[in-house]
């Protein structure tokens, strides 16, 4: 995944540096040194190079270039390098700020290792910041990373734009807060205590937010604007405008009321889904037609109180509306903890009732000293906070660390709405559902001088042993997979006797992965993801039992991930990037009745879904609506947005450089290719053979010059001739039967282009198209634009005259209703003109699969040029390479902060799964949007209940049928049908397996006889199949034309049944065990 030869990484000046290293521990944070340049094509961060789009591409689609540049100028101090501080620092280094200084005067302790994934057991007693420095510096060589083990002083703080305090006493927070607010330094305070988290932001008296939500500005087409005060705007009814009252918009391309085109952004009031009002239009001209209205992001000013003031009069962001009263309680609780720590120079001991009572007393004193209305203190909550305060959990550190790092990015970029000003979070549902007091005692939770002490302090030693015995399957080792594996390693999942983790991913590491998939380094590029990730997490925790594989999950690998494999698992964690694979794994988990942790991200948005056997619905139970597709006629002839021209360009790529080559190769190697092609519906046989004829005869290039000539001719066909034909059919002033202009509304009137060899866009198209054609024929191409220009001046382009009688469809309905006749004579002519496969022995073509992230393969060069030329035809604003890659490559924007936060929430659900929680209310599906900011939770949807007779069933239930009977013989179809009739009072009317119909009541039954053949006197299988005395596996093999593999222990059958009243009823599927 990366960019192109004509437009590589954008540069300001200077050449690419070549080598690099990291800063040494103890470097003075006030003047962070510029690190030497990194390897693997990464350059120094500073004035000599702009943003490395190859590395930051997915993050750039979240933040944008301007916000990224601001981040690259920010120096950040992260104080406190326990698990939370490390998570913040890790996300900031990956994100690409200018410099990160790690501050921590304290040595590592055993409890730190339960969340601090860069500490090893031999590091206990060493300074946390200095140990973490080299491992963090490897993450991003653009970022200057240094360490400081001295005290926190004003001189130190003054060198930074943003300060992050973690694991900091309240007295320190207060003086740092005063200093930073006075000096204009932005401050983030974050803390985690067991299952509780806290976050505070102070970004000064006047922070300007340039984009409050991160959404792409909306735009739509105008159909009418009235004169008045206010004027009312009506949009085309193709889609709702999506605006909200208070939005600002601008207008372009309005005819008649042209004053609108020159107005500054105007505030609107929404009147309906297609209408809104604007300012006074009474003095403007009369609206005639056309116009595009576009949303404009307006800066917003935010004011923050300093920590000392906000502590007394807090403003909260609620993370769980089911716990809306808790932030105020936890605000007191955390202050009481600080009071206890100041008094005793330690935190409360795990599960110490004495210490918890003291913390409760301190909280009561704080409440009594509070001015104004006082809420009733939740004593149980405060005591629970005290009992867990010494706990240190990796999932909490990941969640709060992801949020805190995103707030730092907001502070230095002005992008997205910051937290104002306090956020509190708890996950108490992770504690035992029953018998908590008996299970979690001081003895169970006492420190043991082991790497899991921080987790044992919360959950006790018994759960730690249980975590070690778990067997889990992690599907995918991308961004989410890396975070999952890191969390699993640190919390000890699969690290004990009998436990283990299997991770599979068939992808290799690419440069663009390094910005989020933090287990990988530049020198790992081109290695297998799963292998590299397994090595990295085993280094974090040598006790981890992990197996890496490179198999794609799906029907093709069910011999690998078979019954034995799944039955041995305790659960599955998905880290997939497509819905089809997610649904496949969901079906496998339902079948094997295994819990599933499902999570996903999209930019700053993320979600977690937990699937629990016999309790919740499955992932596949609900689906998002399908994406709206672009009508074919819009793509072919009537585009009105850059998305349309980019999709057209993608279709061009496939139709020029992939499909013809595949068809030619099939024609040469497959004797039945012609026969199969001629059976295709409609005019498809003619279209396929025309393409094969062009590739092998009429347009086959023999040299690089031929490729250039072909590209030039194709340019004229698409951007001149095709448009002239379209305008011949539909002249610019043509009107419809209703009297309106044909070229109005969503139809933009095009104009043909004139080829100019000195036009860089025209030349770029030819260079890219010619090189791609050459690649598909195995010819040698060229990047010498001067030589290409010389060749182009020698190309003779014939004149074009639009033809009469050419039909151009105006709508998809018209296209579908048209049924053009197949030209049999032309078909025969083509068949005769094609060289025989024997004449083409030794020749083959090379189909090109689109790859958006390789800067040297001409793929994106072609897409950008083809799309922008078509956009020029239709006067659509062009898209730069960055935006084109996003749309054409269907890239999913991603950022490390969201991934960390989402996986933190998923791993909190893991604690519940391992303990075997059975209450639906204990589990939480999580949703977040760090841009807003929003965090919310909902109870998972219970699995729907169905019923036949008095039997209740859900998607997790099934009929268990032993196919092999006690005598060793397998069940016949007759026995199978009778079994359901006698045992379940169900008459099977239809029986299927996958897509194969095995039996139906309307299939004529065979009578008597044995074996699988037809009855005497009955002609053929068709009348007697399936024979009632056939074994079930014989029927499956016969109908599916596949033998039942030896790895298959059971088959799945779907039933349609009637009850005793002959009524259709819905019943579960059948698991038919054969081994």
Image (spheres, grey):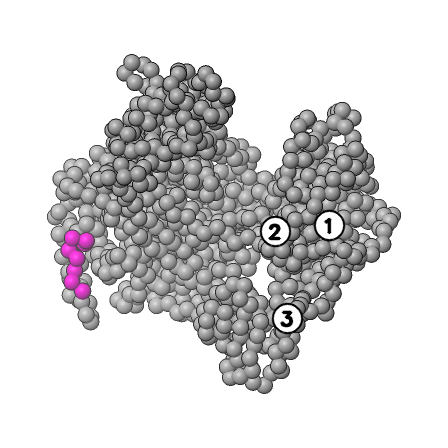
Residue 256 position by quadrant: bottom right
Evaluate if marks 1 and 3 touch, with contact meaning CB atoms under 8 Å apart: no
**On the picture, is 354 further left or further right than 999?**
left
Q: Label 2, label 3: how many angstroms apart (C-alpha)?
A: 23 Å
Q: Pinpoint residue 297: horizontal percent, then vertical percent.
A: 51, 67
* Among numbered discs 1 and 3, the one appearing first in the sequence: 3
What range of the chain is rendered magenta?
Answer: 375-382
Q: Residues within 10 Å of mark 2 (few under 14, many from 20)?
A: few
Residue 29 in the image: x percent, y percent? 45, 52
Front label number (1 vs 3): 3
Q: Quadrant of residue 464?
A: top left
Tell me if residue 535 can be seen.
no
Among the two numbered marks 2 and 3 on one chain, the one whose residue lies closer to the N terminus: 3
Eye-nearest disc, 2 or 1: 2
Q: Is residue 218 left or right of residue 386?
A: right
Q: Nearer the viewer, residue 570 or 1010?
A: 1010
Which residue is labeled 3 in the image?
Answer: 738
Which image quadrant: the N terminus?
top right
Mark 1 burial class by Cα count in 10 Å: few <14, some 14-19, many 20+ = many
Residue at the spot of label 2: 816
């Amino acid at each position: 995944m990366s960019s192109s030869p004509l437009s590589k990484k954008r540069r300001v000046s200077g050449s690419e540096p070549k080598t690099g290293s990291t800063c040494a521990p103890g470097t003075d944070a006030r003047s962070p040194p510029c690190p030497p340049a990194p390897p693997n094509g990464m350059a120094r961060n500073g004035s000599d190079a702009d943003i490395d789009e190859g590395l930051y591409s997915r993050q750039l689609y979240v933040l944008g270039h301007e916000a990224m540049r601001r981040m690259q100028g920010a120096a950040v101090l992260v104080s406190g390098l326990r698990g939370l501080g490390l998570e913040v620092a890790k996300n900031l280094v990956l994100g690409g700020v200018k410099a990160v200084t790690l501050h921590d005067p304290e040595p590592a302790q055993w409890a730190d290792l339960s969340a601090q994934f860069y500490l090893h057991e031999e590091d206990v007693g060493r300074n946390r910041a200095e140990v973490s420095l080299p491992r963090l510096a490897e993450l991003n060589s653009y970022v200057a990373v240094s360490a400081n083990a001295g005290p926190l002083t004003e001189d130190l703080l003054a060198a930074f734009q943003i300060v992050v305090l973690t694991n900091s006493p309240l007295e320190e927070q207060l003086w740092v807060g005063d200093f930073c607010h006075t000096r204009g330094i932005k401050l983030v305070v974050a803390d985690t205590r067991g299952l509780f988290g806290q976050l505070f932001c102070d970004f000064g008296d006047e922070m300007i937010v340039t984009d409050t939500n991160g959404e792409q500005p909306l735009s739509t087409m105008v159909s009418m604007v009235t004169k008045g005060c206010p004027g009312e705007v009506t949009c085309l009814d193709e889609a709702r405008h999506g605006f909200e009252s208070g939005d600002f918009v601008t207008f372009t391309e309005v005819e008649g009321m042209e004053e609108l085109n020159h107005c500054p952004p105007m505030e609107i009031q929404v009147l309906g889904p297609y209408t809104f009002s604007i300012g006074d239009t009474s003095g403007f001209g009369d609206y005639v037609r056309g116009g595009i209205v576009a949303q404009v992001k307006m800066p917003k000013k935010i004011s923050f109180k300093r920590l000392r003031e906000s502590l007394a009069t807090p403003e909260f962001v609620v993370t769980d509306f089911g716990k809306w009263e808790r932030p105020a309680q936890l605000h007191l609780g955390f202050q009481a903890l600080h009071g206890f720590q100041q008094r005793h120079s330690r935190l409360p001991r795990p599960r110490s009732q004495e210490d918890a009572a003291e913390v409760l007393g301190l909280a009561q004193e704080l409440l009594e000293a509070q001015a104004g209305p006082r809420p009733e203190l939740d004593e149980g909550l405060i005591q629970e906070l005290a009992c867990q305060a010494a706990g240190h959990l990796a999932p909490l550190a990941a969640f709060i660390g992801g949020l805190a790092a995103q707030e730092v990015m907001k502070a230095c970029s002005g992008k997205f709405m910051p937290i104002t000003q306090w956020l509190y979070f708890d996950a108490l549902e992770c504690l035992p559902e029953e018998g908590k007091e008996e299970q979690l005692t001081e003895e169970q939770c006492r420190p043991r001088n082991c790497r899991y002490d921080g987790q044992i302090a919360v959950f006790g030693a018994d759960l730690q042993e249980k975590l070690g015995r778990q067997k889990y399957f992690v599907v995918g080792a991308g961004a989410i997979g890396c975070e999952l594996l890191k969390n699993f390693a640190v919390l000890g999942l699969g690290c004990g006797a009998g436990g283990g983790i299997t991770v599979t991913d068939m992808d290799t590491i690419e440069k663009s992965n390094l910005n989020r998939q933090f287990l990988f380094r530049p020198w790992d590029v081109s290695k297998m993801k799963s292998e590299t990730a397994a090595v990295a997490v085993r280094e974090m925790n040598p006790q981890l039992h992990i197996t890496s594989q490179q198999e794609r999950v799906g029907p093709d690998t069910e011999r690998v991930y078979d019954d034995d494999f799944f039955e041995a698992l305790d659960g599955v964690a998905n880290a997939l990037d497509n819905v089809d694979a997610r649904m496949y794994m969901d079906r496998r988990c339902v079948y094997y009745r295994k819990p599933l942790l499902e999570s996903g991200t999209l930019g700053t948005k993320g979600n977690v879904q937990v699937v629990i056997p016999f309790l919740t619905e499955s992932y596949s139970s609900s689906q998002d609506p399908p994406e709206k597709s672009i009508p074919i006629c819009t793509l072919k002839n009537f585009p009105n947005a850059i998305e349309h021209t980019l999709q057209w360009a993608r279709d061009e790529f496939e139709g020029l450089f992939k499909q013809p080559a595949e068809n030619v190769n099939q024609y040469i190697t497959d004797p039945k290719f012609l026969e199969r092609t001629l059976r295709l519906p409609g005019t498809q046989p003619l279209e396929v053979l025309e393409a094969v004829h062009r590739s092998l005869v009429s347009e086959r290039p023999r040299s690089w010059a031929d490729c250039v000539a072909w590209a030039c001719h194709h340019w004229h066909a698409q951007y001149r001739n095709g448009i002239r034909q379209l305008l011949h059919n539909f002249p610019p002033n043509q009107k419809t039967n209703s009297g309106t202009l044909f070229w109005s509304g969503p139809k933009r009137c095009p104009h043909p282009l004139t080829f100019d060899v000195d036009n860089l866009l025209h030349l770029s198209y030819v260079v890219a198209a010619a090189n791609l054609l050459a690649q598909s024929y195995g010819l040698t191409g060229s990047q010498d634009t001067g030589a290409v220009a010389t060749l182009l001046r020698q190309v003779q382009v014939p004149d074009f005259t639009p033809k009469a009688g050419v039909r151009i469809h105006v709508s998809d309905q018209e296209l579908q209703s048209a049924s053009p006749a197949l030209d049999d004579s032309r078909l025969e002519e083509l068949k005769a003109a094609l060289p025989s496969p024997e004449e083409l022995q030794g020749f083959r073509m090379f189909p090109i699969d689109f790859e958006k992230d390789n800067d040297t393969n001409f793929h994106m060069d072609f897409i950008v040029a083809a799309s922008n030329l078509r956009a020029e035809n239709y006067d659509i604003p062009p898209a730069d390479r960055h935006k084109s890659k996003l749309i054409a490559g269907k890239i999913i924007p991603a950022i490390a902060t969201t991934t960390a936060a989402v996986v933190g929430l998923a791993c909190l659900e893991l604690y519940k799964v391992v303990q075997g929680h059975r209450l639906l209310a204990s589990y939480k599906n999580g949703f977040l949007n760090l841009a807003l900011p929003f965090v919310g939770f909902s109870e998972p949807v219970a699995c729907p209940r169905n019923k036949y007779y008095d039997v209740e069933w859900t998607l997790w239930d099934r009929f268990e049928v032993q196919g092999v009977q006690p005598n060793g013989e397998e069940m016949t179809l007759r026995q199978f049908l009778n079994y359901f009739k006698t045992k379940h009072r169900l008459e099977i009317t239809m029986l299927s397996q996958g897509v194969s119909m095995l039996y139906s009541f309307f299939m004529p039954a065979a009578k008597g006889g044995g074996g699988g053949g037809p009855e005497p006197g009955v002609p053929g299988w068709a009348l007697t199949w399936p024979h009632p005395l056939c074994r079930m596996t014989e029927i499956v093999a016969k109908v599916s034309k596949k033998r039942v593999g030896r790895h298959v222990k059971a088959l799945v059958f779907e039933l349609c049944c009637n009850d005793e009243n002959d009524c259709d009823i819905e019943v579960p599927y059948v698991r038919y065990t054969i081994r």
